[in-house]
Image: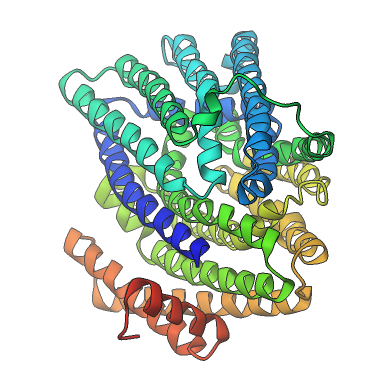
Amino acid sequence: MLRIEQASKNIKYSTIAYVINNLLKFVVRLIFVRSLPIEYLGINGLFTNLLAMLSLAELGVGPAIVYSLYKPLAEKDTETVKALMRLFQKAYIGIGIFIIVAGICALPWLDWFIKGNAVADIHCFYIIFLLNTGVSYFYSYKRNLLIADQKQYINSIYQSGGQIVLAVLQIIVLLVYPSYWLYIILMLLVTIGENFAVAKKADQVYPFLQDKAVKKLDSGIKNTIIKNVKAMIAHKIGGMAVFSTSNLILSKFVGLAAVGLYSNYYLVISAVNSFASQFFTSVTASIGNLLVVERGDKKNKIFRVMEFTVAWQALIVSCGFYVLFNPLIELWLGKRFLFESIIVDCLIVNFYLMYMRKAVNTFKDASGLYWNDRYKPLAEAVINLVASVYLTIHYGVIGVIWGGIISTLLTCFWVEPYVLFRNSIEIKLKDYFKDYFKYAVVTLLTAFFSKWLYNQLFSEITIINFVLGVVLCLVVTNAVWILVFRKREEMVYLRDIARDKFGMKFL
């Protein structure tokens, strides 16, 4: 029950932070595209991806140490926690310095990534983005202790507070004095301030972090961390190749304007993923605790509930995207920022495949199974890069999306559940895929029906019609899901939680 209460608290604060933060992000983007040339929008996307490649230096140290924190936190072993955090500190300060130095060394090759660059001061802009990435490591390691100890809500408060301050200041700057210089300098200053503040809060919550006397870390724990870090190197490379190269490929073979358009759609998708990440980050520590203290059948039951919940969420969002993605972009930014429907449809397919991995990956991360599928991300990276580059050269923007779809289907789609069920959760792979395809078919049919119904009811793209379309999608998707799966064990479990923990006695 304590795990449910902690997870509920984390989810509540994360949801509030998400709503405020992302509403402001959309306002900032709207003012940005009306105040500055679209090439500056492309710079944002390009540098974000480029510096994510440099963040490969982190090598998975964070996830490996966070996994090692679950057991000592559950057992209230303060000395081991102190030793792990000292290791965390040394590793992250070194990583931050390495990223800054390596980023400066890469500066002469910056123009190679940009087709037809016409932006002045781009090298100076890059330095600010580089510092923003590097200095975040100097204090951010302490936030991971809060997350591992099921106190994600504290991190959410500080993180969202910093983002709200940043958004408000950037809006003021863009309205009063449209300067990209000031826009990104504010980003750097807020990053430094927010990381410093959350580190001080962690010191208050865990006073023992100030202790000078720290015992030597147990060799068994250290060897586990080293083993997991070795495995995470492959995972980081794979993740970088899949999630941090799309804008680089578009910038190189299509141009910064295409990156600007793509980044608008990606901002919407990221908004959904950031909300999901808040949810899954909020429950990962509780799942880690569950895996440490509970028996097998309890673990299996909770996994099935999470997979069912993920599929439900994927249905709602995917149908909403299929019906309303382009109307949203048109109302928000204008028709000149629209992609063709086929490109949008491919984005939605890619989103669905990625989103449906969340339950498996949450349990896999909480189980510390980084070593067991260490070769998967390398295969994923090679397939993604080859397919994306080839298809983008020949077919443009849609090629980079298809590269992601192909690499996911050939690797993550089956390898990740196989590793989890073989090493942690006792569920048959065929039963998992049977449910997966059942969920996917319901989603596909519901999406087609929702779009057909929307087109029958609304002929013009207006704010009122868009809002009614959102309501329509929410009603149709939830009604279909509840009707089809009302008797499933997972639905009954969720209903009982809603009644007992959230006071929804009417269910």
Quarter of the image that includes the C terminus: bottom left
Image coordinates of residue 190 in percent, x first then y, are: 36, 23
User: In the displayed structure, would residue 87 be above or below residue 232?
Assistant: above
- In this rendering, does residue 334 appear at all? no
State which quadrant residue 462 falls in: bottom left
Image coordinates of residue 390 in percent, x first then y, are: 70, 41
Q: Residue at x 59, y 56 (%)?
A: 354
User: In the displayed structure, would residue 116 be above or below residue 440?
Assistant: above
Q: Number of callouts in the render?
A: 0
State which quadrant residue 429 falls in: bottom right
Image coordinates of residue 485 in percent, x first then y, are: 51, 86
- In this rendering, does residue 246 appear at all? yes
Does residue 108 appear to the left or right of 322 in the view shown?
Answer: right
Front one among 452 and 64: 64
User: In the displayed structure, would residue 188 be above or below residue 288?
Assistant: above
Front one among 249 and 185: 185
Does residue 160 appear to the left or right of 70 in the view shown?
Answer: left
Image coordinates of residue 393 in percent, x first then y, are: 65, 38
Front one among 64 and 235: 64
User: Outermost residue, bottom direction?
Assistant: 487
Q: Residue at x 59, y 30 (%)?
A: 52
Front one among 356 and 222: 222
Q: Residue at x 32, y 40 (%)?
A: 25
Q: How are the colours assigned in the image? A: rainbow
